[in-house]
Image (cartoon, grey):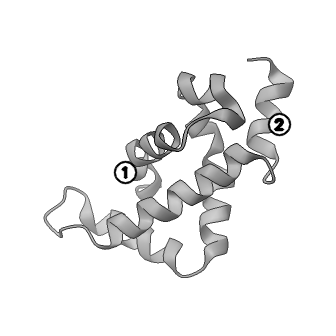
């Protein structure tokens, strides 16, 4: 991917990938909110989920700040705005602990 294309993907909150990431983060926060307290790292994950569920703008802000992490995945980066919902959700889910521990 060329630099201009990558810049457009992570900097423009109006593009489809950014919106998919925001929705995937909101869905992940919902799932974490209801997960078992026995889940590894649950305390940090739960606080992350609570913060995100307080306002829909929190998921949008989180998406904007995590786009580079999502774009580290070569499948999503190559597909860009055409990345599937499943691929985006998979990547976001794999980043929950990193996002929660920041």
Residue at the image position 33 percent from the left and 65 percent from the top? 32
| Rendered position, 34 above or below 1 | below
Residue 44 in picture, x, y percent from top left: 34, 65
Residue at the image position 76 percent from the left and 37 percent from the top? 9
Apparent side of residue 101 relative to residue 22 in the rendered image (left or right): left
Return the residue at label 1: 97
Residue at the image position 86 percent from the left and 26 percent from the top? 4
Frontmost residue, 32 versus 101: 32
Per the rendering, the mark at residue 68 is: none
Residue 57 in picture, x, y percent from top left: 67, 72
Q: Residue furthest right?
A: 4
Apparent side of residue 35 relative to residue 78 in the rendered image (left or right): left
Residue at the image position 62 percent from the left and 50 percent from the top? 20
Secondary structure under badge 1? helix
First in sequence: mark 1 vs mark 2: 2
Give the class, few, some or many, for how many residues have Cα within 10 Å of label 2's Cα (few <14, many ≥20).
Answer: some
Q: Residue furthest bottom?
A: 54
Frontmost residue, 39 versus 90: 90
Secondary structure under badge 2? helix
Per the rendering, the mark at residue 8 is: 2
């Amino acid at each position: 991917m060329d630099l201009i294309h990558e810049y457009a993907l992570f900097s423009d909150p109006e593009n489809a990938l950014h919106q998919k990431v925001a929705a995937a983060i909101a869905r992940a926060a919902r799932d974490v909110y209801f997960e078992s307290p026995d889940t590894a790292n649950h305390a940090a994950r739960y606080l992350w989920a609570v913060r995100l569920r307080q306002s829909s703008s929190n998921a949008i802000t989180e998406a904007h700040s995590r786009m580079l992490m999502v774009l580290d995945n070569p499948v999503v980066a190559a597909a860009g705005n055409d990345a599937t919902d499943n691929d985006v959700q998979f990547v976001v889910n794999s980043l929950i602990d990193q996002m929660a521990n920041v």
